[in-house]
Image (tube, coloured by chain):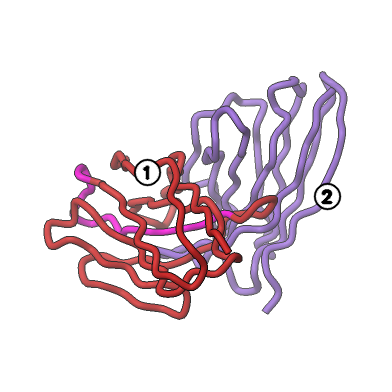
Chain colours: A red, B purple
Amino acid sequence: DAKTTQPNSMESNEEEPVHLPCNHSTISGTDYIHWYRQLPSQGPEYVIHGLTSNVNNRMASLAIAEDRKSSTLILHRATLRDAAVYYCIPSGGGADGLTFGKGTHLIIQP
Amino acid sequence: KAGVTQTPRYLIKTRGQQVTLSCSPISGHRSVSWYQQTPGQGLQFLFEYFSETQRNKGNFPGRFSGRQFSNSRSEMNVSTLELGDSALYLCASSDGRVNTIYFGEGSWLTVV
């Protein structure tokens, strides 16, 4: 499994953009980059995933470096509901289980 | 579309007992995976089933087992419970292809 490095915690203000970085320098060529988040007392929630090019959905954007060794999850306008632990997970999917690291604890200030 | 449903949500068991947890995946999903979450070890993969076959297994002792039924519903069983088995057990379902698994809210197990 590819090793990931994420900041332990980040803090942002409500209604401001948030950029959550992740390094995955040992990612294999076929692994997708997944982002999940876990709100307090809930199961993890899918946020976004991508392979090579940048991706957007209603929740966030994912910017993937050209060499795929790093990626950034972008929340365009943070709300208090976005306070959660965010996990960056390279994975081939299918039968492969997701290997969760410690993630980034995102704190949103009102 | 209904999400992943896990039962029971909370339970307390005594050391040495066994426990069975149930998971109903999202309709149409044929893959079910299980995870254990503890404060010390974080989220760890237990096993994954697809069409009633276990395709992958994490690094857990044989006391942890699971199965999947023909309707894709899944159960996991932990025998001879230990205090360290106290955890949040999460079930997730997917269509079995590459991406996007959906988690349930989990079953909180306390072993006393």
Q: Which residue range is magenta in the image?
A: A25-38
Q: Position of residue B60 (x, y in %)?
A: 56, 28
Q: Are marks 2 and 1 in contact (CB under 8 Å)?
A: no
Q: Residue at x 45, y 74 (%)?
A: A77
Residue B92 versus residue A63 in the image, above or below:
above
Disc number lying in front (2 or 1): 1
Give coordinates of residue B58: x percent, y percent. Answer: 49, 35
Residue B87 placement: quadrant = top right
The answer to if A52 sits in the magenta stretch is no
- Pointer 2 and pointer 1 on the same chain: no
Which one is in front, A94 or A87?
A87
The kind of residue tagged 1 is Pro
Indicate yes or no whether the magenta region holds residue A32.
yes
Residue B57 pos. (x, y %): 50, 38
In this view, A71 is above or below A59: above
Which chain is disc 1 placed on? A
Q: Nearer the viewer, residue B18 or A15?
A: A15
Kindly identify the residue that appears in the image at 26 percent across and 65 percent down: A51
Q: SS for tag 2?
A: loop
Q: Report, in whole angstroms, how far the alpha carbon at label 2 lies from the one at label 1.
A: 34 Å
- Identify the image quadrant of residue A55: bottom left
Find disc 1 in the rendering and name its residue.
A7
**Most extreme residue toward the left, as rendered?**
A67
Q: Is residue B100 left or right of residue B63?
A: left
Viewer-nearest residue: A76 or B55: A76
For residue A49, which quarter of the picture?
A: bottom left
Give the answer, above or below, for where A90 lies relative to B112.
Answer: below
- Looking at the rendered image, the quarter that the C terminus of chain B falls into is top right
Crowding at mark 2 (Cα within 10 Å: few <14, some 14-19, many 20+): some
Q: Is residue A60 above or below residue B13?
A: below
Name the residue beneath numbered marker 2.
B8
